Image: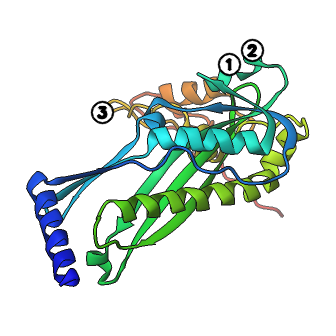
Amino acid sequence: MIRIFRQAGLLALLTALAGCGAIRIEPQKQLPPPLIEKLPATVAIYYPAEFRAYTHKEQRNQVDYEVALGAAHVIKLSRLLQAMFTRVIEVDDPAQARAADASVAMVLEPRFEDYAFLTPRDMAGDFYTVTIRYRLNVYNPRGERVDGYVFTGYGRQKTSAMSTTEPLVRATERAMRDAGAKLAVELPGQETVRRLLAGDMVVPQRTREEEVQEALGSFGSGPAAAPAPAGESEQRDTPAGESPEAGSAAEASPAEPPPSDEAPAEESGTDPEPAAEPAASP
């Protein structure tokens, strides 16, 4: 009897959700920080506007899902960084970090790469699973981007007979905790981060387009030369030892025939006299 009642209640809840056609969830903002040893460094954090207001939206099985992630992640990441470093400041622009605090070792910029989830209906099981992929851009104290890292958090939660939103919320929070734990452990060990925390000057990282441009050299700079007008001959290579002017002059005037050893015949009406034969020897 109780089981029938629960099934009837679940059916009524699903019917109500299908009627409204939307599910809106938001993970808990206050999550426990990790217990780790702080690094003696000052770090700045820059939250882009799209990160603060990020909401994942999709439609599945005629239901609109909206997962508000931005606000909870701002609070969660700020508390995580405060547990990792002795001092954390927030800036509105990476280039303003040094002006805000001269002791800033680096600036971090978080971004969402992807949010994905699967329901028990998708997996033919009893669990909700969530995957959140992030990108963390790293800037030097002058506000120049020098590196970036991609990390992923995973979470799962067993379905509940009385709620379809609560398991998805819990799975999302577990994915956030997993990503935060990976960041706390892996970020200080990255080569670029270690150099910045040690006070080394790290030069900006070149983009793929800049590397291709450098590889092409002069071949990749400037527009292609315009084709020569119709009827104009192509320029020939000038032989070694010959100046371009000499080559142009040679093309302008026809070549004169070489001088002959024989004297030219006189232009008269009579044929020239034949040459005398040599005298015979006695």
In what quadrant of the picture does the N terminus appear?
bottom left
In the rendered view, does 188 fall on the left or right side of 200? left
Q: Residue at x 68, y 49 (%)?
A: 33
Query: Is any part of residue 271 visible from this angle?
Result: no
For the residues labelled 1 and 2, say whether their Cβ atoms are less than 8 Å apart.
Answer: yes
Q: Out of 198 and 257, give the one closest to the viewer.
A: 198
Q: Classify residue 216 by image quadrant.
A: top right
Q: Residue at x 16, y 58 (%)?
A: 17
Which image quarter holds the C terminus? bottom right
Q: Nearer the viewer, mark 1 or mark 3?
A: 1
- Type of residue at label 2? Ala
Which residue is tagged 2? 99
The three-letter amino acid code for the residue at tag 3 is: Ala
Residue 257 sits in quarter: top right
Where on the picture, by quarter, is residue 177?
A: bottom right
Q: Which residue is mark 1?
A: 96
Q: Find numbered disc 2 in the image and state the secondary structure of the residue it sits on.
A: helix
Question: Which disc number belongs to residue 191?
Answer: none
Q: Position of residue 153 (x, y in %)?
A: 55, 62
Query: Marks 1 and 2, Cα distance to the nearest angstrom?
Result: 5 Å
Name the disc covering residue 230, or none: 3
Question: Hey, which residue is sitting farthest left in the picture?
Answer: 19
- Sequence-first tag of 1 and 3: 1
Q: Residues within 10 Å of mark 1 (few under 14, many from 20)?
A: some
Label 2 CA crowd tier, 10 Å (few <14, some 14–19, many 20+): few
Residue at the top extreme, as displayed: 99
| First along the sequence among labels 2 and 3 | 2
Q: Seen in the image, is 86 located left or right of residue 173? A: right
